[in-house]
Amino acid sequence: MSEPERYDVLVLGSGTGGKLIAWTMAREGNRTASIERKYVGGACPNIACLPSKNIIHTAKVASLFGRHQEFGIETGAIAVNMAGVYARKRKMVDNLIKVHLDQYQASGAELIWGNARFTGSRTLHVALRDGGERIIAGERVFVNVGTHATIPDIPGLADAKPMTHVEALDLERLPEHLIVLGGGYVGLELAQAMRRFGSRVTLIAREPQLAPKEDADVAQAILELFRDEGIEVLLRTQVLSIRGISGERVDLQVEDEAGTRTVEGTDILAALGRTPNTQGIGLEKAGIDITALGHIRVNDRLETTAPNVWAVGECAGSPYFTHVSEDDFRIVHANLNGGSRSTRDRLIPYCLFTDPPLGRVGINESQAWANNISYRMASLPMEAVLRTRTLSETRGFMKVIIDAHTDCILGFAAFGPEAGELMSNVQVAMLAKQPYTLLRDAVFTHPTMTEGLGPLFARVPKQRDAEVEKREYA
């Protein structure tokens, strides 16, 4: 075997954390190479976050067209052209790809297209996309290989060739009857979007509620939204077997509390979790351990079990969000420059981009209860926020969890218009370790959604027996 080409920095994968490492370290004068097999910039700009939100926004526009008379607008019959929906998304993705390629060129980081696997300590064999191979080694190596959609071992599921989010975002036709497997974020977002485009949609979830990590009142609000929009939701339902081909006709044998029956449809979307892309890339040959769940084992500085090798993003078991992968980069880069940053105790916000969306940060009531945390709770219906009246978007509510013995904000959730922006305001107060009274007494612009934080926090009980709160929640 020939001697490997030597680099100061090698980055396996060009997702959010990986690309930022490559661009930054190349600009700092390191000879840097990034190896990517398919999607420059990773999943987010190509097949995940940004394309899905593009499609979801188009679905909202379709929904608003359907409500035109409510706003005093007269129009004729409308129809959704899925080829046009796809074209809008594709244009955005193409522009983002160009931005990423320009960044690689401007930074001086070399972008190598191909499939890579470790052959030894900090050494990679790359089967080049256009033919040939390269052997490369780095003084420092960063792994950012991401995850892919899980296809569980349900009899007939793989043979049915179901869509994942990747194929669903590339549709140029409208499924007649889409069956969504999974009640998590991906399933919820795409189920609503496809229903608004005109598909009949059935969502099947094994759990007793949608969004299983959320409080019961949040899950119930999402369920009511879906049923109001004509989405059939089957909870506590197990898929036993599947026959047929997605895109043509599928028959699913399912079981619930009432027994077994058959659900018929034309298409399947599998939204049943994620699997790390850590198999078959030779991690064991580089001394890089993985966990029982398949993530690369890292410490709180994102260092792997191999010297001078780090892992960032989803493959490292970090929460599956682009903004977390970006923070992984910041932690690693700071520590390489003498810092002492850690993944411990990060305050991770997130949003579900249904319409209305859900924004949450910190703990919820379910987590407070499970961890025996004493708390006070306040909630406010969205219709009490006057901005929602101007938008004709009054569905939803906000809720906040406050420490029982101090005025510390423990968690916040909003299900309603601009929920992510509301959540971010509360997050800043939490990061600054400010008491909830700061937001209660602040002067916010009228009429904005943020204005609703004042009356919400004004509802926080001044004194409350935490055990009483827990009995009420239970």
Image (tube, grey):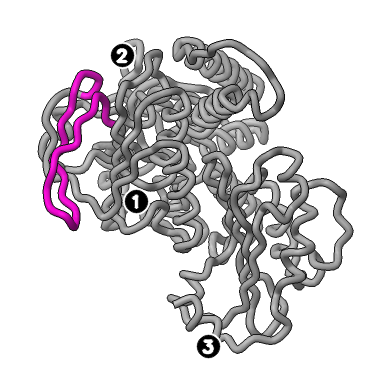
Badge 3 amino acid: Glu
Q: Residue at x 73, y 82 (%)?
A: 462
Q: Neighbour class for label 1 at 10 Å: few (<14), some, many (≥20)?
A: many
- Label 1 with label 3: CB-CB less than 8 Å: no
Mark 2 residue crowding within 10 angstroms, few (<14) / some (14–19) / many (20+): few
* 265 horizontally vs 446: left or right: left
Q: Nearer the viewer, residue 63 or 55?
A: 63
Residue 460 lies in the magenta-colored region = no
| Amino acid residing under circle 2 | Gly
Q: Nearer the viewer, mark 3 or mark 2?
A: 3
Find residue 456 and report its horizontal and vertical position in percent. Answer: 72, 64
Which of disc 2 and disc 3 is earlier in sequence? 2
Image marks 2 and 1: residues in contact by CB distance under 8 Å: no
Image location (x, y in percent) of residue 2: 30, 24
Give the alpha-carbon distance from disc 1 to disc 3, as whole Å: 38 Å
Q: Give the residue number, with chain letter if any, for mark 1.
A: 295
**Eyeballing the image, is 302 above or below 35?**
below
Q: Mark 2 to mark 1: distance in Å?
A: 30 Å
Which residue is labeled 2 in the image? 132
Residue on which disc 3 sits: 467
Q: How far is mark 3 from mark 2, CA to CA?
A: 67 Å
